[in-house]
Structures are given as C-alpha cells and as structure tokens.
Amino acid sequence: MSAGSDAEMAIFGEAAPYLRKSEKERIEAQNKPFDAKTSVFVAEPKESYVKSVIQSKDGGKVTVKTESGATLTVKEDQVFPMNPPKYDKIEDMAMMTHLHEPGVLYNLKERYAAWMIYTYSGLFCVTVNPYKWLPVYNPEVVAAYRGKKRQEAPPHIFSISDNAYQFMLTDRENQSILITGESGAGKTVNTKRVIQYFATIAVTGDKKKEESGKMQGTLEDQIISANPLLEAFGNAKTVRNDNSSRFGKFIRIHFGTTGKLASADIETYLLEKSRVTFQLKAERSYHIFYQITSNKKPELIEMLLITTNPYDYAFVSQGEITVPSIDDQEELMATDSAIDILGFSPEEKVSIYKLTGAVMHYGNMKFKQKQREEQAEPDGTEVADKAAYLQCLNSADLLKALCYPRVKVGNEYVTKGQTVQQVYNAVGALAKAVYEKMFLWMVTRINQQLDTKQPRQYFIGVLDIAGFEIFDFNSLEQLCINFTNEKLQQFFNHHMFVLEQEEYKKEGIEWTFIDFGMDLAACIELIEKPLGIFSILEEECMFPKATDTSFKNKLYDQHLGKSNNFQKPKPTKGKAEAHFSLVHYAGTVDYNITGWLDKNKDPLNDTVVGLYQKSAMKTLASLFSTYASAEADGGAKKGAKKKGSSFQTVSALFRENLNKLMTNLRSTHPHFVRCIIPNETKTPGAMEHELVLHQLRCNGVLEGIRICRKGFPSRILYGDFKQRYKVLNASAIPEGQFIDSKKASEKLLGSIDIDHTQYKFGHTKVFFKAGLLGLLEEMRDEKLAQIITRTQAVCRGYLMRVEYQKMLLRRESIFCIQYNVRAFMNVKHWPWMKLFFKIKPLLKSAETEKEMATMKEEFQKTKDELAKSEAKRKELEEKMVTLLKEKNDLQLQVQSEADSLADAEERCEQLIKNKIQLEAKIKEVTERAEDEEEINAELTAKKRKLEDECSELKKDIDDLELTLAKVEKEKHATENKVKNLTEEMAGLDENIAKLTKEKKALQEAHQQTLDDLQAEEDKVNTLTKAKTKLEQQVDDLEGSLEQEKKLRMDLERAKRKLEGDLKLAQESTMDIENDKQQLDEKLKKKEFEISNLISKIEDEQAVEIQLQKKIKELQARIEELEEEIEAERASRAKAEKQRSDLSRELEEISERLEEAGGATSAQVEMNKKRETEFQKLRRDLEEATLQHEATAAALRKKHADSVAELGEQIDNLQRVKQKLEKEKSELKMEIDDLSSNAEAIAKAKGNLEKMCRTLEDQVSELKSKEEEQQRLINELTAQRARLQTEAGEYSRQLDEKDALVSQLSRSKQASTQQIEELKRQLEEETKAKNALAHALQSSRHDCDLLREQYEEEQEGKAELQRALSKANSEVAQWRTKYETDAIQRTEELEEAKKKLAQRLQAAEEHVEAVNAKCASLEKTKQRLQNEVEDLMIDVERTNAACAALDKKQRNFDKVLSEWRQKYEETQAELESCQKESRTLSTELFKVKNAYEESLDHLETLRRENKNLQQEISDLTEQIAEGGKHIHELEKIKKQVEQEKCEIQAALEEAEASLEHEEGKILRIQLELNQVKSEIDRKIAEKDEEIDQLKRNHVRVVETMQSTLDAEIRSRNDALRVKKKMEGDLNEMEIQLNHANRLAAESLRNYRNTQGILKDTQLHLDDALRGQEDLKEQLAIVERRANLLQAEIEELRATLEQTERSRKIAEQELLDASERVQLLHTQNTSLINTKKKLENDVSQLQSEVEEVIQESRNAEEKAKKAITDAAMMAEELKKEQDTSAHLERMKKNMEQTVKDLQHRLDEAEQLALKGGKKQIQKLEARVRELEGEVENEQKRNAEAVKGLRKHERRVKELTYQTEEDRKNVLRLQDLVDKLQAKVKSYKRQAEEAEEQSNANLAKFRKLQHELEEAEERADIAESQVNKLRVKSREVHTKISAE
C-alpha cells in the first residue's frame, strides 16, 4: 500500500499524526539497522511474546536475550522471525513478510502506542479502543475520506464507510458493515461514526421539513438524533464499558438513485430486560433513570413524583449511580432534544417519561404477609398510588390485581392468592415488560419518522450487536448472544474462507483445501435444529408440569455423549452451578438453566395487563393492545392451532429475528470491522497481550490474514487485466491480429520480471497472491510515468510552436493597429467624423432592443416548460416510490415463500423417512405382539402375586389411617386442654395456635396419604396393565426386593430410635425459639414505647424553644415600640415648645389683664371651684390607690405561696423524670443484651440443627455415639430450663414496663377528659360571645346617638363663636368711634361700656355653659368608648379562647394520628419478624429434606449396586443353563459380554458416586466437629452473658427499689403540701374552671399593661414638664395679680383707664376664643394619636394572643405524659416571674401616679385660664388608668386561679403515680403465679407434641417404604424391558439362522 506524502496528509488537519506515519518516520524506519537472522519474537508466559535477539543455537534449543536483558532458552518452534523495520506500523497487516501471531500483535501494539487505532487486516478493519478522545472524526477528516479508494487513504472507519458507499453506487448492490467485538470494545462509537459519515456526505439537497409537520428536523438530524435516544434507554454502565449497548441493532440507511439519503430504519435484538430490576455492584441500570434524577429539568422531578437521589429507588441503586465519563445532565438535554427532533408528540414525550418514572416507583412497592396466612397484602399504598397515577390507573385496582390475580380455570375466572415473593416477581416482570415494550415502541416510532416518501433504491446496513460473553453465571440471555455471534462468525467464515476456496475450484485453480478449525455448523445445529436446545426448550414450555430438571434430563438424553459440542460441566469451587457446557468457537461456556422455562415463556400478570389495556394513557394501552395470555389464546384457538401467536416464546421470536437478519446480510456485500479491547482497566495506551490475542483468535482475524497470504485474494477478469496492464509490455501482444484475452494475459505476465509462482490462471480470471497486484500497480505507475513524460515533451514542443506562430501574428497585428491609431488621430477632429461617431450607436441600439424582446419571449417559454417538466418529474418520482415499495414487498414475499417451500420440502423428506421407520416399527410391533400373547398365560400367576402385594400395601395404609385417627383424637384432647388453659391465662394463645397448626399439618399429611394411596392404586393398575410385558427375571427381582425390605426395616428401626431422640432436642430448641420470639416482641414493644416517650420529650423541648424564640421576638417588638414612643416624645416636646409660645402669649394677655381688674374676681371664683373639684378627685384617687395596694399585697402573698408549692412539685417531677430516663437507659441495655442473647440462641439453634443432620448421617455408628448424644441432649435441656427461668425473669420485668405504659395511658385518658371539659367551656364561651355581640350592637347604636348630639352641640358652639366674633367687631367699631369723638360722647360711652360689659359677661357665661356641656358630653363619650373597648376585649378574648380550643383539638387529633401511625409501624415490624421466623423454619425444613434426599440417594445407589451384582449372577446362571443350545449361546455370548462390560462400567460409575458420597459424609463429619466446638465455645460465652444479664437485672431492681422509696417520700411531701393548702382549696376550686383561659390572659394583659404603663409614663412626663412650666407662669401671674389688684382700683377712677380695660377685655375675648380653638385642635390631634396607639396596642395584643395560643398547644401536649408537668411548672415559674415583675411595675406606676397627682394638684391650683383644658384631659387620663388598674387586678386574680388549678393537677398526677406503683407490685405477683402455670402447661404441650412427632415419624417411614417400592418396581421394569429386548434380538438371530 503506497503511503502518501506529508502534503497529501495535510488535508486531514490535526488528525494526520493519528492516521499515518510522517515521511520522516518512514525514512527513519527504512534506514534503521536490522539483522533479519537474529531479530526474533519469542514465546514468553507473562507477555505472550517478547522481542529478542538470538545468542546461540544448540540442537533444537535457541538461547535468546530479551529487550529487558533477560536470557531465555526456548524451543525452535517458539521462535518467530521479526519483520523488517519498513513494515513497522504497517497499515495492512496482510502485506507483512512474516505473518504470525507476534507480528500481528506487535504491529497493533505499536500503532496503538502512536494512537493509530485503525489497522487493515486483509478484507476487514481492526480497531482498538483508545479510552480517550482523539481528533480523528472532525469534519475535515470526513471530507478528506470522501471519494478515496481504500489504498489512497489511511485505515479508518470512514474509509470502510466510503468504500461501502462507493460500492453501492458502482456495483448497484446493497452493502452491510458488520461491527463486532466484545463489550466495551467500541462497537457503539464506531456505529455512530458510520452514521455520522453517511449523514454528512449523502445529505439531501434541501433542508426543508416535511409538510405534515410531524418531523421536527431534517432526515440527517433525525438519523443522528436516533442514537442519543436509543443510548439513553438501551445503554448502561458495565464492568468493562461505561456506555455499553445492552441490545443489538441493525440500522439500514436507504439511499435514492442519486446517492442521497432517502430514509432509514432500525431493528433491535435482545434488549437486556433483567438490568431494569437488577445490577451488579460495579454496574448501573440504563442511563435514562440517572438522567431524570440529575435535576437538570426540575419539572420532570415534579411530574414524575420522584426525588433527585437514585438511592431512593431500589431498582436503579443496586450498583453505582454515577459515571465519571458521563454528564447525566447534558445527556438528559440531548435525549430531550432528540425526542423533539424525532417528531414525538408532547403527549408521547410525557408518556415516555411517566412510564420510566413508574418503573422506578415499581421497585419501591412493598408487600407483607397476612397474619396466619401465606397471602400477600400491600405494606403501604403511597408508592403504588404514585406508580398508578403515572400510568393513569386506579391504585386500588393495581394492588388488587397484584395480590389477587384472576386466573382462568376451564371457562370461568377465579381469584388466586399470591405469596409475597410471587407478588414481587410479578412486579419485577411487569416493570421489565413495560420498559421493553416502551423501548420497542420507541424504535417503531423512530422507524415511522425516518420513513419518508422519497424514492429509495439501495441501502447500507450497520450491524452493532453484543459480542461473545463468557461469565461466571451464564443464562439464557448469554446463550442467545453467543448463538448470534456463532451465526455471524459462520457468515464471516462462509464469506471469507468457503467462498474463496469454492471460487478456486470453479476456476480450476490447483488448491489444497485448508481446514482452519472454524466450521461452526455442529454447534449451530446443536442449538437451533429440530431436537436442539431451543427446540427442547420450546417443547418443555408447552407442558404445564415441566420443570428445569425435566428440561435438563431431556437435554442430557438427547445430546450428552452424542454431540461433541455438548458436554457435562465439571463442578468448580467458587463458581455458580452449571448444568451443561457448549463448545463455541470462542471457547467452552458453562450454562445454568435455572429459570429458563419462565424466561422463555415470559409470563405476566394477566389481570394487571388488562388494567394496562384499559389505561387512560394511550401509549401504555397501545403497548399491551396485542397482548393476550396463553390460557386465553389457547382457549380461543383450540381447534385451529396448538400454539397461538401471542404465546410465541422468547427463543422462537429471537430465532425468527435472527433468521431475518441473516437473510438481510446474505443479500448484501459485507464489510467487516473487528473491535478490540486493549485492557481490562480502561487505561489509555496500555495493551494486555493475552487479552488481545484471545480476541484476535475468536474474531478470526489471524485465520483471515493467514488465508489471505496462502490464497489468492486478488483476481481480475482477463479482458480487464489485458486492457489495464497491456501498457507494461505492449510488444508481448502483437498488434493488428485477434488474440484471446487469456493467452494475451499469459504472454504479458510471462514477459514481466515477477515471481511466477505468485499468480494462477483460472478459466475466466487471473488470480494473484497478496501483494503482487500492488507490485503490478507500481510497475504500471512507473511505465505510465515514462509514457506521460514522453507525451508531455511532445505536447510541450507542439504547444511552443503554436505559441511562436501566434507571437508572429500578434507582432503584425500590433503594427497594423499602430498605423490605424495614427491615422485616427489625424482625422478625429473633423466635423463629419464627429457626426459619424454620434449616429453609429443609435443604429445598434434598435437592433439590441429587438434581440432583447425575442430573448424574453424564449425565456418565458423555457420557464413554463421547465415548470411542467418539474411537476411531471415529481409525479413520476412518487409513482416510482410506490413501485419500489411494491417491488420490495414482492421480493420479501418471494423470499419467504422460497424459505417456506424449502422448509416444506425438508419436512416432506423427513416425513418420508419417518414413514419408512414407522413401517419397520409396525412390523416389529406385530411380531412382538404375537410373542407377548404366548407369554401372557405365564404372567397371569405373577399378576396374582402383585395383587397380593397390593392388598398388603392397602392393609399397611389402613393401619396408617388408624394411627392417624388416634393422633387426631389425641389432638382433639390436647385442644380441649388448651381451651381450658386459655380461660386461666391468655398468654398461652400462641401455644394453642401452634398445636392447631400441627393438627392441620397432620390432616394435610392424612390427605396427602390418601392422595398417595390413590396414586399407589393408580400405579398398581398401571403395573397390572404392564404385567404382560414382564418376563422371568421378575421373580429374581422380587427375591432381592424382599431382602432389601428386611435390610430397610432394620435400618428404619435404628433410624426411628435416633429420630425420636432428635425430635426431643428439636422440640426443646423450638420452645426456646418461641420464648425468644415472645421476649423479642415484648422488648420491641417496650423499646417502641420508650422511643415514643423520648420523642414526646423532644417535641416539648422544641415547643419550649419556639416559645422562647417568640418571646425574644416580642421583646424586640417592644423595643421597636419604645423607639416609636421616643419619637412621640420628641413630637410632644415640639408640642411643649408650642405650648410655651402660647404661655408667652398668655403672659402678654396677663399684662393686659392688669388693666382689666374687673374680670379677675370672676376668674378667681372659678379657680376656687376647680380647686375643690380637684381636691375631691385627688382624695378619690388616693383611696383607689390604697385599695389597689391592699389587693396587690394580698395577691402577691398568695402568688408567693403558690410559687413555693409549685417549685417543690416541680423538683419532685424533675426527680421522677430523671429516674424514668435512667430506667429508659437501663431498658436499652437490657434490650441490647436480650437481642444479643436472641442472636446467640438463633446461632445455637442453627448449630444444633447441623448437629442433627450429622447425627442422621451416623446411623451406622448409632450404638457408639448414643451415650454422647444423650449427654448432649441433657445439657441442652438444662440450658433450656435455665433460659426459661431467665425468660420468666425478663417477662416479669417487661410486665412492669407494661404497667408503666398503662399508667401513661390513664394519664392520656385524663387529658381526653380535660379536652371534653374544654369543649363544654367552648360552648359556654360561644353563648357568651353571642350575648356580647348583641350588647356590642346596642352600645354602638347608643354611641351613634351621642355622636349626633355632640355634632349638634358643636354646631351650637360654632354659632356662639360667630356671635362672639360679631360682638368683637361691634366693639372694634365702638372703639374707633370713641377715639374720634371721646370728649363729646363720654356719657354715651359710659353707658355703652356698661352695656358691653353686661353683654361680655353674658357671652362668657354662655361660653362657659357650652364648654361645660361639651365636657359632660366628652365624658359620656369617653365612658361609652371605654365600655365598647371592654366589650371588644371580651369578644377578642372569647375568640382567642375558641381558636385555642380549636388548635388544641387539632393537636390532639394530630397526636392520635401519630399514635396510630406508630402502632401500624409496630405491627409491620411484628409481621416482618414473623415472616423472618417463617422463612427460617422453611429453610430449615428444606435443608432437612435435602439431607434426607441425599441419604435416600445413597441408599438407592447401594441398592442399584446390589441389583447389578445380582443381575451379573443371574446372567452367569442363565449362561450356565444355556449349555443345551451351544450353537445359539456362542452367538449370544458376545452380546452378554458386551452387556456385562456396560453393567461393569455402570457399577464402577455407581461405586465412584458412592465414594464421592462417602467423601461428602467425611467432610460433613469434620464440619460437625468444628460446629460442635464452636457451639461449646458460644455456649460458654452465652453463659457469661447470661450471668452479666442477671447482674444487670439485680442492679435494675435495686434502682427501681430506690425509685420507689423516693416516690414514697415525694408522696409524704405531697400529703404535707395538701394539708397546708386545704384552707385555700375552696377558693382554688372556684377558680379552677377559668384557669387555662385566665393563665393565658394574664400574660397577654401583662404585655398590654406594660405598653399602657409606658404610654402613661410618657404622658405623665409631659404633664410634669407642663406643670413645672405652669408653676413658673403661675408665680409670675400671682405677683402680677397682686400689683394689678392695686392698679385696678386706680383704673376705675379714671375714664381712660376704664377705656383701656375695655379694650383689653375685648382683646382678651378674642385671644380666649383663639385659645379655645387651638386647644380644641390639640385635643383632636391627641385623640387621633391615642387611637393610633390603641391600634398598635391591639396589634400587639393579637400577636401576644398568637403566642399564647401556641403555649396552650404546648400545654395540651404536656398533659399527655408525666414529663408535661415539668414543662407546665416551668411555664408557671415564668408567669410567676412576670407577675412579680408586673407587681413591681405596678408599685412604681402607683407611686408615679401619686407623684403626678400631687404635681397635678399643685399645677391646677396655679393654673388660671390656660389650665382648664389640660386639667380635663388629665382627669380623663386618670379615669382610664383607674379602669386599666381594675382590669389588671381582675387578670391577676384570674392568673392566680390558673396557678392553683395547675397545682391541683400536679397533685393528682403524683397520686396517680403512687397508685400505679402499687398496681405494678400486685401485677408482678400475679405474673409470677401465672408463670408457674405457663411452665406446667408447656410441659403438657410438649408431651402432646412428642406423641404427634412419633406418629409423624411412623407416617414418614411408611411413605419412604412406598417410595422405595415404587423405585424398585421402576428399576425392575427397566431391567425387564432391557432383557426382553435382548431376548427378542436373540430370538430374531436364531430364527434368521
């Protein structure tokens, strides 16, 4: 093969160094020093072959030195010559000089080391997996390989693909590319590259989408996108490969007539269904499951109701869940886009994901066994609900169908019960079926989408199928895969070897046929031909009672010893059991046939399938639309066919698909690609020699290369050869005369200097050895180069001469042009010449327009014709597509008809052969019938003997029935006793159930005996019918039978005695087991209850933490409110500043008042009145404060007493809590000890049963071992008694814990009573709430009326103010008038002054009256508002109480549901324990049966041995008696000797098996001794553990005693507390009814009071500051008033002073009115501020109420356990602290109120006109504070009542604990008494069990005798048949002679 230059390789881009060596490397390789004589490869065990240099040769030995420096001496046949360096990294290994295994191996290794992973090897391409990404698949590489021949480009998968494409176009023949190799070799990657190449080079002309709109991408995109989707659902991680295809596929890419892509389709084979439900540890399931859980598309997680953790799903988490080389998130997006590109509808896309999710949920469905039944039932429905929802099914119907499927029996359907294992098997089968059918449906949909209407002519098929598999455990799947590879290897052999050699024969080439040992027909026929493995498997699947054993026996009968490829495997340690071996081309594979019948039938739950067919999900319904059960199908087609189409087995379907595949492959031209795994560790660049050589041998690569070298792979027709290579020596073929092409080729080759042994002449072709054609091509290229060089010289000379002539012409033309230009330059300025230049273009334009018009018309015509032709072309193309489809269908029909015809012919020939054989058999049968009639008379006597035997057997059976009747009577008596005992002690129910079960077992055994009797009668009838076939040897066999019976009876007697002893030991172990189970159950129950108590304590602690968090939040909220109050203070300061401004104005007014002394007297009188009123209010306030202090002191005293008492009770409860926790820890220790003890007992039980089996094996040594066994049994009984006493002690302690649990349950009942009481209180509160709502409505109505009155008064006030302003204006007018005319109208002014003074006084009186009325209205309004607020508070309180009760009810319901759930969990644990015990008992029974079967097998072997010896003696006697017929005996002698040899061989085989069994017995004895020593050691350990348990129990009892003493002391303390508090008991009982509500309200009121107190403090601070200012102002005013008093008298004397005083009075009136308005606005703003603060307070109250609600919930939970008292006490402590704090705050507040009151009194005395409104405001505030103080007192009293109620509750709980202690002691005594009764009852039950076991042993003995009689009869019958055949042959020979 010619290697291209570096320039030629440049088109490959960065891939060039990975495809071919550079020129520099080739030159260096050719110039490398090399000694062909000494450079060799040597065989070496570790590396297979190593490079070496020969050191010396000595005879047949060669000494070599390896590259590593080691010296080896090997044989000459282990030394292989090395190829010259120029063949290093050769691209085609068939071209190597020395072709052998090491040469091929090292060439591949060196190329792999240089990352050249593709290498040619003759006809096919070998690729090695690089385990890393290489840039050899880039677009430039695709373009570089396009159109290149194989020899022109480096080896590559693209080269194979392009050659197939070019062959398809040139040869017009379908092509196929077979990509094979082991798993992980890179088959799938190469398949994708092939599809990528075709999708790139053969793209369709347009990229438009289909008109239908279904296709979401172009055909090329869809073909490429099919891979991600199929990989997601069909690929998985295996040990060798991270992306292993677990199915085979054959992708056909169809091309049109022009070589463009037309369509594609995919066929799949053998999807590995079992991976859906099971994976090995180092593997994982299909990629799609992990892609979905990668959370790349969160909407899928929500839609499928799954989590993102694959470990949550059992089906997909048995192995690994992540693969480093795969990004599941990116792969999910690729899969999702592939689904869209391939045209799946959104509904179908959702269905795919939902069905995948349903499969995941199927793995989590749980089932459990019903109590006392084998029936399965669901263990929770949550998972089933999810799976059913995803499949659009009803969950209940699905579970019912799984647990109770409907089965057709006859013409009716009945419901069948299922065990748990059967249900799990059904679920797994359904999950696998849904996944497989969905996968096949997706493939079908992809094919539909890839099928276009474009015309298609040829296709290229790409086969990617699993390679040969040899595992430790090989099942049916491996057989199918290996059979497929066997067929493909046969196809390869046929194509490469057989066809080659047949071609040589046809052409007449002298050729010696070479057998390469690769003929696979024998193995293939063994598997697929009639009576082959698949045929027998399908036949067994038709029989309902067929088993794996019957299938194995048929295989052995048919093939063992008859076929060399079928072998019986040898058992090997550490590997799974194998049943048969097949010799494949790749090696011998051991197969295990377990479960093959079920796998082949692939049964499904028909009821669930029926649900699937009715599912609302269209996709699911369509998947199972064609499914029908075998029963239904068979019933519908009884008369038509034996086997319906739906009952097609897996193997039959597989063979059908495989035959289609092989038919397709045979119709194509194949191209072979062999994929190689370089190493097992997935290490890039590393190669394991032995692994690669094994694959090369299995793939046929080495044999292919060898046949290429030995054969003639290149051949050319004579005509083609003559035409192509005539140029090599044209003179050898004479010109001008006709000559035959063959002779011309012979002359031509003879005249060339080549090796003439390297080619042969056939009839039509010339054949060349490998490499010769390449040499001829090189010679041809050299010859062509010479010829072309000469031709180029001649052509160049001719061209240069032509060019010379052109140059001469150009020279002359240049001269001519120059002359004309000169002439033009002379005439271009002439006028006529200019006119000529202008006219000439116009003449040409008219002509061009005409030409343009004609061209347009022609163009339009051409366009119309083109459109017509295009439409016609499309129509013809569509017709062509339909015709091609019809043609393909007809071809397929013809092919199928031909196949069926061939099958029919084969069947016809077989039938003819069978007919001939049957005719011969008929003749033999007629002859035998005549003989049998003669012998019939002789055998009638024997019939009578057999009838006598039958009668004896019947008598034995009657005896058995009598014994069974006795056993039943004894059982009835035992049941009566047990019923009497149940009245005394309910704990013996389990023993009664045990006895009833045994009774049922005996009844079943009785029924089984009757069935066996019936079967025996049937067998007797068959024996009587067969009596005509028995001959003389029956009498001898009967004698031996009698001897065997005697021996058997002796052995049975000894065995029965031993069995009786063993039964006693087993019964004792069973009793211990039952006691252990009871203790385990009690321990689990106690442990569960303790865990519940712990969880409750943790819940209460969590609630406490939450409350503390909320308290902190409220404190933060209070701080925020304080900040807001600070802001309010700032605003108040601002208001104070404004007030100071007003005070300054007041000073100015007071200065003016100095001039108006007449008005001061009235003001002084008003001040005096206010002082008296203020003194009265102050006295009232002082009395109220004294009263409040007295009540607060009384409350504090009571509160302190109750706090002290509660503290003592809390301490007691804390001690109780600590003791309970200590008991809990001790119980945990006891549970751990008991569990370890139970495990030890279970181990001891297993060891004891092993001992029992070994004792049964030692029947022959019974007498010597009897004493030792008796001693062992005595020790076990002593141990049992010791364990029973300890179990009694444990049960007593557990009963104490039960009593404690009952105490807790009583406290739970008390809490439920409290809840009912709270419900009654809730009803009363709702009634009160309704009454308050009515009162609220009426008060609101009154408030509206008062508001209307207030508005009317405001209007009146406004009118008065208007009148006042009018009067002021009149005063102003009068003032001006007086100033203008003062002197003239002095007297008039005096009169006017008096009138005005009177009017002013009247106006002031009127204003005062109006103000008083407003103040009274304001007071009424304030009072009504207070009442409304009180009512609203009461309503809110009632609502809060209702909400609290509702929350308590919900919390109680929640607690109940939690208890129910915990109860169900406990029940499930109990059932699982029972299930485990049942499985252990069944396993024990199975082991016993297996042991008994092995003993029986040993006995049968011994009997057969004796029978054979007896037969030998009988035969020798017959030979002695036959002396009369010497002539006949001489002929018979050879036959007898042959038979003797056969019998001797059988005897030796039996003796060998007997020795094998004896060896097993010896091993078992050794194991027994080991187990015995182990048991002794463990018993000693358990004794120590039991002593430790006793010590622990003593400590527990002591701690319990100390706890009891502490409880007694706490009780005495409680009694003392009770006496102390009897005086307050009546009052506390009265307060008890409202305790819960008031306790919560006290906290809320405390918060409210705290906020109100802060507001009050702020107001009082403001008032204090105002009072101080007023004091200063008042002092100033008093001083000025004294001065004014004197000045007023002087002013009265003078008119001017009077006028001034009048003016000042008028101004004062104006200022007063303005001040009234200002104070009114301030009042309204303060009211708004107050409302805002009240709203904030109400919000705080609501938040506090929510906190209180949560605390109430916590209290309700706390009442359900003793520990709740501690929590409640802590809360009470907190409330006491808060109450104390509240009291302190209250004292401070009262002191502050007193101080403020004092200051207020002083301020009111000093205040004159401006203090009136402020005093009213302070009075209102004082009233509010008084109301709040009263409310606070009420709430405090209610809190005290709640505290007393809690104290009473704590006392009740302490009394209950004391009573429960006494009950525990009483119950303990009762338990001790009942325990003694239990022991006596157990002894009686054991006696009854002993009697039943003895009867059962008798029954088993008789049953064994019956079975042995049957076996002996069968053996006798077979022997008689053999002898009869021999005698008949002797008779025929005698008659013939």
Image (tube, grey):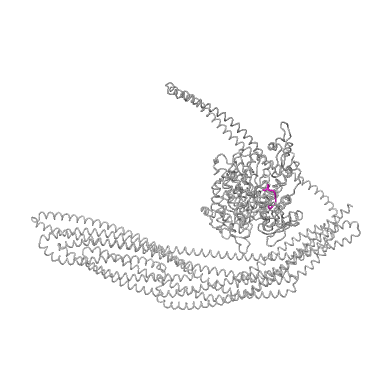
Task: Check the picture and name the quadrant holding the N terminus.
Answer: top right
x and y, in percent, of residue 1795 in the image: 28, 70
Which of the two residues, 16 or 1682, is positioned nearer the viewer here? 16
Q: Which residues are magenta?
A: 93-102
Residue 1179 occupies quadrant: bottom left
Q: Quadrant of residue 1206?
A: bottom left
* Residue 902 located left or right of residue 116: right
- Above/below status of 1163 relative to 99: below
Please state if 1110 lies on the left or on the right of 1488 as rendered: left
Residue 1489: x percent and y percent? 70, 65
Q: Is residue 95 in the magenta section?
A: yes
Residue 1814 seen by the camera: yes
Q: Which of 33/86 is in front?
A: 33
Q: Quadrant of residue 360?
A: bottom right
**Vertically, is 1294 above or below 1361?**
below
Image coordinates for residue 1604, horizontal then vertical, percent: 51, 77
Asked whether residue 1924 is drawn in magenta, I would say: no
Q: From the viewer's perspective, is 1853 left or right of 60? A: left
Q: Nearer the viewer, residue 1602 or 1309?
A: 1602
Q: Is residue 563 above or below residue 1112?
A: above
Residue at the spot 71% in from the left edge and 75% down from the top edge:
1268
**From where the camera sits, is residue 364 visible?**
no
> Residue lying furthest left in this view?
1384
